[in-house]
Image (tube, helix red, strand yellow):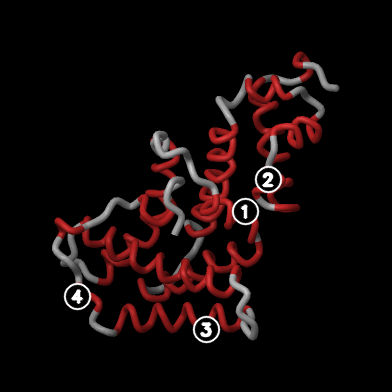
């Protein structure tokens, strides 16, 4: 068993998060247990609670790292126009989901207790991911308000997420990665070209951006 003096708290935190991610990759949320993590890093259960308040706190940090990874990849795209940017952003999302299925699923499977609010730092990560899409809709339709751009991004990303969920996590047979990518491209092109701008709701109907990736309300 490792001793506390061998690592700083920051080092232990990173060890815990890496171990937690490995457990999620191997077996999903069901494998994410404090004792499993402790055994993996060679520390006691008590050492983990020196770094994280509770298991929910730990899982939120694991989820946050997944959001950061997706957002970081999205920030690297270089496209010639907003429509191509949307296709590239969607491609990153579906590839992350298909290549990291258990980590992606964890973001939506885990629920915070009803009396616990989503941490501010986690909401900021959600907003940062949404902003990648909002910026493209602002460029496509300069007349949209910032709230309308957010609502549009919410509907758009919700559609992409729904397709990913249907094909990657359902028991429906006959679907493959090509079906996933082609379905998303079809959604993007219809969304952009079929008069979506004229159907935007008034700004006072805009929902909070936490609807899709909120810890308490998976899509």
Q: Is residue 133 above or below residue 84?
A: above
Q: Nearest the camera: 1 or 218?
A: 218
| Mark 1 vs mark 4, CA separation in Å | 34 Å
Q: How many marks?
A: 4
Q: Closer to the N terminus: mark 2 or mark 1?
A: 2
- Callout 1 crowding tier (Cα within 10 Å): few <14, some 14–19, many ≥20: many
- Callout 2 crowding tier (Cα within 10 Å): few <14, some 14–19, many ≥20: many
Q: Are marks 2 and 1 in contact (CB under 8 Å)?
A: yes
Which residue is identified by label 3? 182
Q: Secondary structure at mark 4?
A: helix
Q: Closer to the N terminus: mark 2 or mark 3?
A: 2
Q: Secondary structure at mark 3?
A: helix
Residue 17 shown left or right of residue 120 in the figure = right
Q: Secondary structure at mark 1?
A: helix
| Mark 3 vs mark 4, CA separation in Å | 25 Å
- Callout 3 crowding tier (Cα within 10 Å): few <14, some 14–19, many ≥20: few
Q: Nearer the viewer, mark 1 or mark 3?
A: 1
| Mark 2 vs mark 1, CA separation in Å | 7 Å
**Location of residue 106 in the rendering, given as x and y in whole percent from the top left corner:** 58, 51
Which residue is identified by label 1? 103
Which residue is identified by label 2? 21
Q: Secondary structure at mark 2?
A: helix
Q: Residue furthest front?
A: 114
**Location of residue 53 in the rendering, given as x and y in whole percent from the top left corner:** 55, 25
Q: Closer to the N terminus: mark 4 or mark 2?
A: 2
Q: Is residue 219 above or below residue 175?
A: above
Residue found 65% across the figure and 48% down from its top: 29
| Mark 1 vs mark 3, CA separation in Å | 23 Å
Residue 199: numbered disc: 4
| Mark 2 vs mark 3, CA separation in Å | 30 Å
């Amino acid at each position: 068993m490792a001793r506390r003096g061998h690592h700083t708290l920051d080092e232990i935190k990173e060890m815990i998060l890496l171990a937690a991610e490995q457990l999620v990759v191997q077996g999903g949320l069901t494998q994410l247990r404090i004792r499993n993590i402790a055994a993996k890093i060679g520390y006691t259960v008590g050492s983990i609670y020196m770094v994280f308040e509770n298991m929910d706190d730990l899982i939120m940090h694991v989820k946050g790292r997944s959001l950061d990874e997706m957002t970081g990849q999205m920030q690297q795209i270089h496209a010639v126009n907003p429509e191509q940017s949307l296709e590239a952003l969607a491609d990153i999302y579906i590839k992350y989901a298909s290549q990291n299925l258990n980590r992606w699923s964890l973001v939506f499977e885990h629920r915070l207790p009803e009396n616990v609010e989503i941490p501010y730092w986690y909401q900021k990560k959600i907003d940062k991911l949404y902003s990648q899409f909002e910026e493209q809709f602002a460029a496509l339709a300069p007349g949209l308000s910032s709230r309308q751009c957010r609502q549009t991004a919410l509907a758009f990303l919700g559609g992409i997420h729904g397709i990913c969920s249907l094909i990657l996590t359902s028991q429906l047979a006959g679907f493959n990665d090509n079906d996933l990518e082609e379905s998303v491209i079809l959604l993007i092109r219809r969304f952009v070209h079929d008069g979506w701008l004229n159907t935007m709701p008034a700004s006072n109907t805009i929902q909070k951006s936490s609807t899709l990736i909120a810890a308490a309300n998976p899509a």
